Image (cartoon, rainbow, N blue to C red):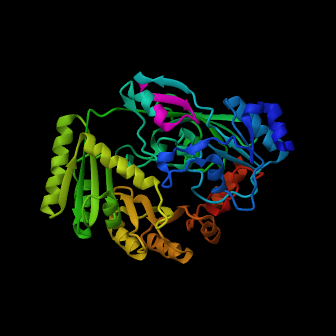
Amino acid sequence: MSAIAQTFETLLGADAVCAWDAACFQTALPDSQRPDSQPRSLQSQIAQAITPETHPDCILYPQTAAELAEAIACAHRQRWRVLICGSGSKLHWGGLAAGIQVVISTARINRLIEHAAGDMTVTAEAGMRFADLQALLGKAGQFLTADPAYAHTATLGGMVAAADTGSLRQRYGGLRDFLIGISLVRTDGEVAKAGGRVVKNVAGYDLMKLFTGSYGTLGAISELTFRLYPLPAASQTVVLTGEPEAIAQASATLLASGLTPTGLELLSAGAVKALDRGQGMGLIGRFQGIEISVEKQAAQMLEIGQVLQLSGLSYTDADEAALWQRWQELMEQRSPEAPIFCKIGVLPAQAVETLVQLTALAAGSSPAIATLHASSGLGTLQCQATAQGILDLRQVCQAQGGFLTLLEAPIALKQKLDVWGYPGNALDVMRRIKHQFDSENLFSPGRFVGGL
């Protein structure tokens, strides 16, 4: 065993330390989510998040927030570079970290701290899996309003670090909107807290928003508090398909109406085909709440589609569940024909036009699959593309006031490109924040915007 591993074994115990070449890595993704039906180890996930010349010494599994703080403090004293992760399900998103010596997983820091059902809040440790928390909340008729990728394995801390909200953004906003408290371990091992366990807590520096989407570059999240909502009594989903101009008009009409969908997604023709829901571009609206309201709103969306000569289908119960299960698979599985997965954003008014341009530009051996939240203009793109092709796609997004971030791609392709491609004027501020939180540049160096 190496000197680094021995140091942490003395500090945390043998069960908490796993050498890089040992066979004790926890599986990150279950077999059912792998196209080739082979389990993906955490080691393979880490390998997709670091440069090829980087060889971590060991991975640590602290079991408490106190042990997490001790491990980070030790790494800081020794100036060892650290990569923080949960289950590793989205560790391969973003830039490649360089020179990592120690990987620290929060997967075993996974307790439910408090569910204040009357206050509609929940506090849990960062390593708790999203699916496990939802199951517990469901018994009390409540739920956490997120719809992340890899929902069965995603941890709460990982969701926040990657700012991964999903289709429910339409009704409930992003993670930053319902994250109301956070505990974290700074890069020097000191513990910090912000927010609280009541919804109307607005005092203090907003660490919740700062750490959401920070990709583990500012510190390690140890505990989170979220605002909750009651489970809806009824749910119905409407899918409209047809010509782009009519889809754009339907989207604008819905957004300007008094309807309150929990999800409203624009789909490229390739996405509609992959979902096997018709021809042309698509618009998916999901309505949840009391039964009479859900039925009337779904009927109104179908009427809007009829006026615009769009094909319309409505789904409830098992059919609706199957549709959204297929949607989840579409967001998670990559085929050899479309190994590139990007996060994109454009001005909402230009969303349909941009989808048409992107899918035409990304046409390859298989249709590009693109989706956008109708009201925010945020979404994803899956395709096959060269480095120059990615730059061309990014230019299309930037011309519409948006962006394209390369989340998943072969390592060789990520090394050729600026994964983030950030053209804005906030990079200097980001660098100063990074220096304030991690002056030694020890936490996930290279993972974030501008190589931070």
> In the image, is residue 12 above or below residue 380?
above
Of 204 and 136, nearer the camera is: 136
> In the image, is residue 144 above or below residue 176?
above
Magenta includes 121? yes
| Quarter of the image where the C terminus is located | bottom right
Of 125 and 207, nearer the camera is: 125
Q: Is residue 278 left or right of residue 67?
A: left
Tally of numbered discs: 0
Instruction: Tell me which corner region of the image, top left, top right, bottom left or bottom right, holds residue 231.
Output: top left
Residue lying farthest to the front in this orientation = 37
Instruction: Tell me which corner region of the image, top left, top right, bottom left or bottom right, holds residue 24.
Output: top right
Residue drawn at (56%, 64%), measured in percent from left and top? 409
Magenta includes 353? no
Magenta region: 119-133
Residue drawn at (52%, 24%), measured in percent from left and top? 114
Q: At which x and y percent is residue 431?
A: 67, 57
Q: At which x and y percent is residue 167?
A: 38, 49
> In the image, is residue 299 above or below residue 64?
below
Q: At which x and y percent is residue 28?
A: 58, 44
Residue 82 visible in the snapshot: yes
Instruction: Tell me which corner region of the image, top left, top right, bottom left or bottom right, holds residue 112.
Output: top right
Q: At which x and y percent is residue 109?
A: 62, 32
Q: Is residue 232 left or right of residue 39?
A: left
| Quarter of the image where the N terminus is located | top right
